[in-house]
Image: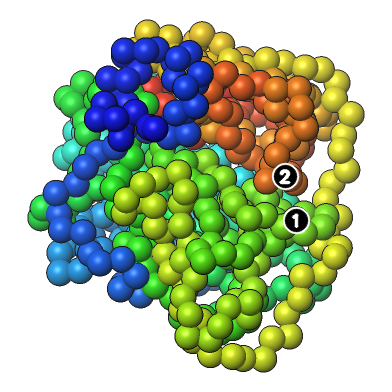
Amino acid sequence: MSARRAGLSRRGFLGLLGGTALAATGCGEVAGELLAGSAPMPAPFTVPLPIPRVARPVSPGLYEVTQRVARVEILPGLRTEVWGYDGTFPGPTFELRRGEPATIRVRNELPVPTSTHLHGGVTPPDSDGYPTDLVVPAGGHSGHGGHAAHMTHPGEVHHEGAKDYRYPVGQRAATLWYHDHRMDYTAPAVWQGLAGFALVRDEEEDALPLPGGERELPLMICDRSFAADGSFRYPRTHEGHDSDYMEGVEGDVILVNGAPWPVHEVTATRHRLRLLNASNARRLRLRLAPGGGFTQIGSDSGLLAAPVRHDTLPMAPGERQDVVVDFSAYPVGSTVTLVNTLADGPAGNVMRFVVARRAKDDSAVPKTLSRPPERPVPVTTRSFDFRRTGQSWTVNGRVYRPGDLLARPRLGTAEVWRLTSDFHHPVHLHLAHFLVLARNGRPPAATDAGWKDTVDVRPYEVVDVLARFEGYRGRYMLHCHNLEHEDMAMMADFEVV
Ligand SMILES: [Cu+2]
């Protein structure tokens, strides 16, 4: 029985028993603290699934996107103020191709500074969305945002009004995403809507007969809570993050592509689902009801060598799963519901597919998908401990300070990074992609397959990853992708030398 079902809040539970007891009782699957909303919840599976607009370049290789405030209908009949790339939540999808460099000019018309990180991108350091490399709104709003006063940090860089983020796109086809990454404010800014997809394609993927077009769906799953007037609820105090939500904020409404518990009509054919857990803190364990499975074809950083079949997909914040679901296995007229078995009640539902009719299907999932980079030989091992220290979340006992380097790996080498934790910490490395080698000295889970950039480290777990430092020299970061933990200092810098 979970602590919540027993009538105790998780913060009370943690306070009462402490983290060790939490892990020992097996209640440790839920990471955050639930923030209940007060808006009427829509009936599930009534709102159509939106597909984010695909961004069009203004000239070859140049995109422009404007971060601005918009009022959009998320809950039927109510308006929600979002901070969106081009005023939408999710933002537009950037379709990128390996070998074709792209520049994304991000204009900031929000009341707060921003920093945009391409998550999973192999990106030069000056375009990587460092937390103090800021685009400040034109017109001098940088010092006093409407929602949150802007504390300045040593070494902070200000770009007035806009910044050109340059992406060489030398990497393999993969499901990437972009989101705000500003120091101390990533969690509220992403909650407010600053997130979108970026899909990298390449010739290796083009040659495969995978489902495409309308049968390829990017699905951004995240939770939010709403006040009675439809506005987002988010707990903050004047000093910053609300310590009652130290473990992370979980919403009670599940959104897919910005719509609550949507429904989507499909033909009885294979569909490719590019799943992203974009929640601040909520972990997911996805399943199909009434049954069936997922054929995983890709991980965070690209296609697998060969497909892997799963009945359930655990997904921590920041992780992606590229899967194929064959809807011809279900009777025409039936429904297939994507559920999250880690939650009770409304949050246990995600979205529903309606199998509308038969259709021709030329797609297939070949036995050989791709040739991922070979496993490199590590030159050294380093340890990173993700742990609560007082009122902060720390890495190796240190509260994040920009420029405080924890490692200096050499370009072109690989290292084993041993990740340990006291709680759920989805650990994300910028620049470097990695293979999961072991969990507690044992082989990793089947769902850890392939090259990744984010790994779910569970309470008191030891996770060994083999990271490749390829691409660029310079300063990058590793951090917890529970966004409240990240804002409460669970980040560290490393420099590729
Ligand atoms: Cu964490």
- As displayed, is residue 174 above or below residue 452? below
Q: Is residue 358 visible in this depiction of the protein?
A: yes
Please state which amino acid type lies under the numbered disc 1: Val
Question: x, y percentage for residue 325?
Answer: 62, 69
Residue 75 vertical placement versus 191 (above, below): below
Amino acid of disc 2: Ala
- Quadrant in which the N terminus is drawn: top left
Residue 16 sits in quarter: top left
In the visual, does 84 lie left or right of 323? left
Give how far apart the Cα atoms at labels 2 and 1 are.
8 Å
Residue 408 falls in which quadrant of the image? top right
Residue 445 screen position, x and y as percent: 70, 39
Q: According to the image, label 2 marks what residue? A: 446
Q: Earlier in the sequence, mark 2 or mark 1?
A: 1
Please indicate whether residue 464 sits to the left or right of residue 41 in the image.
right
- Vertical relation: 54 (above or below) 248: below
Furthest-left residue in this view: 229
Residue at left offset 21%, top offset 59%:
41
Residue density around tag 2, few if under 14, some if 14–19, many if 20 or more, within 10 Å: few
Secondary structure of residue under mark 1? strand
Q: Secondary structure at mark 2?
A: helix
| Label 1 sits on residue | 308
Q: Nearer the viewer, residue 475 or 25?
A: 25
| Residue at left offset 31%, top offset 14% | 15
**Residue at coordinates 39% horizontally, 57% vertically from top-left?**
349
Q: Position of residue 47 (x, y in %)?
A: 31, 72
